[in-house]
Amino acid sequence: MEGRVVVSGAKNAALPALTAALLTEERVVLHNIPRVRDISTMRSLLEDLGVDSSVTHEAHGNRIEIEARQLLNPVAPYELVKQMRASVLVLGPLVARFGQARVSLPGGCAIGVRPVNLHLKGLEKLGASISFDHGYVDARANGLRGTKFYFDTISVTGTENLMMAATLADGVTVLENAAREPEVQDLAHLLTKMGAEIEGAGTPEVRIRGVSRLHGAEHSIIPDRIEAGTFLVAAAITGGDLVVERCNPEHLTAVLAKLEEVGVQVVRDGANASNPARTLNVKAGRNLRAHDVTTLEYPGFPTDMQAQYMTLMTQAEGSSVITETIFENRFMHALELVRMGADITVNGRRAVVRGATGLSGAKIQASDLRASASLVLAGLAAEGQTLIDRVYHIDRGYERIEEKLTQVGAKIIRISESD
Ligand code: EPZ
């Protein structure tokens, strides 16, 4: 694979940014929004709630304008929540601004049980009353009050939900053991532009001083570090020379360090304080070396890159142990890789990959978003043709992946079920 590929805006930053618009009646304008299915699902949910929104194509991604002047009904229905767990991010803003929210409880998902108990516990600490009926959570509050909340487990959307709720609470809220992901920091950046008072985003302790109201703002979403990481692995697994544009290398430190260990050459281009859109050039030989990895919360190695890394390790010399500490069931892709000829054994949250083994094209199926990306990468490295079923998973979080990869030399086409 050779050439230049452009990274889209981050899905996991765009989703909370869209729900943050619920916190004000004024217009919020967001740029660099990726054209992926989860964004359309979130827009449908917001429109269901009574929010006006419009989309405009821009050179990079979409521009979305949102105005939550009024609320028709504070309900996030099962039909939408089951498509996308991140729908739970409307809970905090709705309770904070409108004093009520009824949200379908997200069920389990392919990668784990994924409860939202910490979101609810935190809202209760902020003064909301929480009740459950018919698969829905009902949250009500007559104004939220600042509090101190410790996350037993670090949660990205949990931190985002409570941070948004606390912006309109009476007094100061301190979130401890909070998530430090760049997407959390980007949300805090947007909320601050809307008039919120937030300190410490990106550190384990976030302090929010509540204000009486928030106003409109304009904001450009950060680049998608997981999409960028996926392209870096695509170059590494094909022995390519790729320039990955409009990414932020600082958000990829753990991934870049691991790729360099494995034997990939990484050059950081155009990095300076004033220019956030930067470029990475990766060059990979054929002698990849196996290295263990353990997924961790940011700034550790991201769980959303684990599947892609596993595929890479099937092409590296030696054995590697992959330990998944965030989700209890995130090795579904391993079985499909074994069907392609990989040598992988899974034992609970640990997988051992022995390489390098030749992969041969096969009919395989994706189980979730990142697993589908790892199978596309396997197809690029395999001999012969690979047919991936259920690629709708990939469209949830990757913008036109087959077009972007074709531009840099991949032989990949989308065929519909009927073909
Ligand atoms: C976010 O999910 C991302 N999604 C996920 O990306 C990502 O894998 C995950 O963070 C971890 O980095 C979005 O931002 C929309 P968590 P989130 O709450 O917030 C447990 C992708 O591929 N937990 O940080 O749902 C939970 O079960 C997706 O783009 C509780 O126990 O993840 C998990 O084991 C997949 N109770 C751990 O914490 C709670 O109330 C971390 O989950 C909340 C979480």
Image (spheres, grey):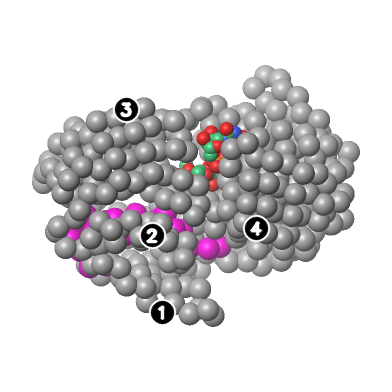
Circle 4 is placed at which residue position? 201
Secondary element at tag 3: strand
Q: Residue at x 32, y 40 (%)?
A: 322
Q: Residue at x 38, y 60 (%)?
A: 228
Asked if residue 339 is positioned above or below residue 176 in the image, the reply reads: above
Residue furthest top as drawn? 134
Circle 2 is placed at which residue position? 228
Residue 312 shown in magenta: no
Disc sitting over residue 347 in the figure: 3
Tag 1–tag 4 contact (CB < 8 Å): no
The CA span between labels 3 and 2 is 29 Å
Tag 3–tag 2 contact (CB < 8 Å): no
The CA span between labels 4 and 2 is 23 Å
What is the three-letter code of the residue carrying label 4?
Ala
Asked if residue 32 is positioned above or below residue 24 in the image, the reply reads: below
Dot placed on the residue nearer the N-terminal end, 3 or 4: 4
Range of magenta residues: 221-243
What is the three-letter code of the residue carrying label 1?
Gly
Asked if one can make out residue 391 in the rendered structure from this viewpoint, the answer is no
Q: Is mark 4 within 8 Å of ligand 1?
A: no
On the image, which quarter does residue 162 sit in?
Answer: top right
Looking at the picture, how far across and down is residue 99, in whole percent?
Answer: 83, 40
The CA span between labels 1 and 3 is 43 Å
Circle 1 is placed at which residue position? 270
